[in-house]
Amino acid sequence: MTLSRRRSSCFYFAAFLPLVLLGSTLVSLSASPVAIAGDVRVMSFNIRYGTASDGENHWERRKEFVAETIAAYDPDLLGTQETLEFQKQFLEQQMPDYTSVGLGRDDGSDKGEMTALFFKTKRFELRDEGHFWLSETPGKAGSKSWDSSLPRICSWVRLKDRQSDAPREILFINTHFDHRGQQARNESAALVLRKIDELGADCDVVLTGDFNSSVTSVPYRTLFADAAESSRLVDTFAVAGTKETKGDTTISRFLGDQFAGPRIDWIATRGNWKILDAQIDRTAKEGRAPSDHYPVTARLQRDGKK
């Protein structure tokens, strides 16, 4: 199923953001690795839904910080989770060099959270796009199954990289698993893997998301270990990530120095990718993180094989 995409352009948003632009408040932005010709910079970021009662961490108080954190890494591909329509519109305004794709999970339009994704418009040619729901009826908007507490959605695009000689297109897919239903998470992992086989059998694949699952869980094993070799994905952080001495959680609870907890946000690949780097971005301002999840990043390069 292919649904209509949404695009927006506004004022220029600089990819390099010096600390002086942030005023007198000290910000510890993660250093961006030196670019390598043809590399693909990927970010996955649960930005926390903007109507949450978060007090001093409410969206209106941190939205510029979210945008600054994205700009500092300058991703070519960005997958966001818990993105409401007005949050997507704000990011579109801040990111005019990107094309966005996203639909509300509740009605397949603008109601409910999105797994909105963004890609650099000049670099990538959009070949196809779509959305499916993590349910037994994935083509039905707003559907949920198993023990899922809420409808859950997955958005995807097929892209041609104008800067690469690699003959294969890129399938970029972004999702958010249920936070309560264990069976729903298990079934969602199996469904996502089937959909990747269906949509991207001839593609180099990038998967981003908040999977609400630890690296010892059934969904993790389904995606990265138990699948047939032709379907199996690669966990970029497990291959190339810098391990933290205090742990490698991606749950921040808005705290810049929070380390306790599981790594539930992943960037995965399949196909002809070389993983150059993978990190958990612990950007903080006055001890506060821009969201209740840390964004995760990966820098990839294709080998040009068929």
Image (tube, rainbow, N blue to C red):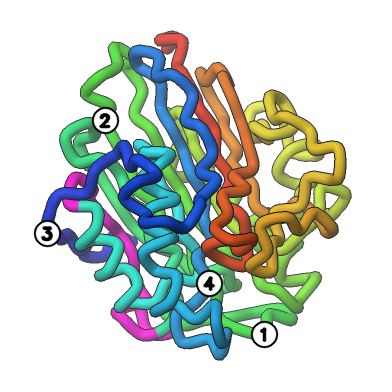
Q: Nearer the viewer, mark 2 or mark 4?
A: 4
Is residue 28 positioned above or below 37 on the image?
A: below
- Name the spot of residue 10 as percent of width and height, x first: 11, 59
Q: Name the kind of residue labelled 3 in the image.
A: Cys
The span from disc 3 to disc 1 (Cα, nearest Å) is 36 Å
First along the sequence among labels 4 and 1? 4
Q: Secondary structure at mark 2?
A: strand
Q: Nearer the viewer, residue 7 or 53?
A: 53
First along the sequence among labels 2 and 3? 3
Which mark, by number, is residue 10?
Answer: 3
Label 1 belongs to which residue? 149
Let me know if residue 105 appears in the view: no
Q: In the rendered view, does 224 fall on the left or right side of 62?
A: right
Q: In the rendered view, does 235 fall on the left or right side of 75?
A: right
Q: Nearer the viewer, mark 4 or mark 1?
A: 4
Q: Is residue 106 magenta?
A: yes
Which mark, by number, is residue 48?
Answer: 4
Q: Secondary structure at mark 4?
A: loop
Residue bounds of the magenta highlight: 96-111
Label 2 belongs to which residue? 160
